[in-house]
Image (cartoon, rainbow, N blue to C red):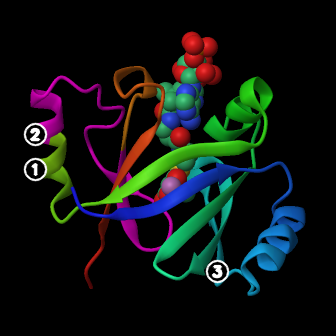
Amino acid sequence: MKKIEHIGIAVKDLEVSNDLFAALFGKPHYKIEAVESEGVRTSFFENGPNKIELLEPTSADSPIAKFLEKKGEGIHHIAFAVDDIEAELKRLEGEGFTILNKIPKKGADNKLVAFLHPKSTNGVLIELCQEIKP
Ligand SMILES: CC[C@@H](C(=O)O)C(=O)SCCNC(=O)CCNC(=O)[C@H](O)C(C)(C)COP(=O)(O)OP(=O)(O)OC[C@H]1O[C@@H](n2cnc3c(N)ncnc32)[C@H](O)[C@@H]1OP(=O)(O)O
Ligand SMILES: [Co+2]
């Protein structure tokens, strides 16, 4: 597992939060991308070496809609970059972590992603992501 790839923040209204984070960093988001399989619309900000992903739900059964209902807006997950997601999932399963999707799926920003259940990681949802090479 390598560096933090991004921090995911659940928001109710992407446009409102885009303005807020643009004011915070002094520059606008660099992309907006919908990921239908997760029921989200995302935007990405880069600030120095750090990346922030804002996530707005696009359907009532989206994990983000559920999270907003229970906890409100705020940090939803921490994503770590990996070179080989399948090998890393195998290793983490062997260490006893609960893998939410053993088959990596297509995420945003050209990544394959998989998640560890927050109940197995001290209450923090962990995302692994591997860049999709052309
Ligand atoms: C855009 C694509 C991608 C990217 O490229 O970056 C993304 O980031 S997608 C992000 C959205 N997708 C996901 O989150 C997928 C993985 N998540 C899940 O599979 C589910 O959300 C979950 C973690 C399994 C929870 O689902 P479920 O059990 O149906 O929801 P509950 O509301 O009943 O929660 C159970 C339990 O877990 C706690 N919880 C839920 N979400 C989080 C969270 N993000 N961080 C910490 N804890 C979380 C929730 O509070 C419940 O706890 P208890 O009330 O104590 O039981
Ligand atoms: Co993410």
Q: How many marks?
A: 3
Residue at disc 3, secondary structure: strand
| Callouts 2 and 1 close, C-beta under 8 Å | yes
Q: Which residues are magenta?
A: 90-114
Q: Is residue 38 magenta?
A: no
Kindly identify which residue carries mark 3. 31
**In the image, what residue type sits under mark 1?**
Ala
- In the picture, residue 8 is in which quadrant? bottom right
Kindly identify which residue carries mark 2. 91
Q: Is residue 100 magenta?
A: yes
Q: In the image, is 61 to the left or to the right of 37? A: right
Query: Residue 121: percent from the left, percent from the top?
Result: 36, 28
- In the picture, residue 24 is in which quadrant? bottom right
Which residue shows up at 59% across the image and 66% down it? 52
| Residue at mark 2: C-beta within 8 A of ligand 1 | no
Q: Is residue 20 above or below residue 47?
A: above
Q: Tag 1: Cα neighbours inside 10 Å, few (<14), some, or many (≥20)?
A: few
Query: Residue 1: percent from the left, percent from the top?
Result: 21, 55
Marks 3 and 2 sit apart, C-alpha to C-alpha, by: 33 Å
| Callouts 3 and 1 close, C-beta under 8 Å | no
Marks 2 and 1 sit apart, C-alpha to C-alpha, by: 6 Å
Q: Nearer the viewer, residue 82 or 110?
A: 82
Which residue shows up at 73% across the image and 28% down it? 71
Looking at the rendered image, the quarter that the C terminus falls into is bottom left
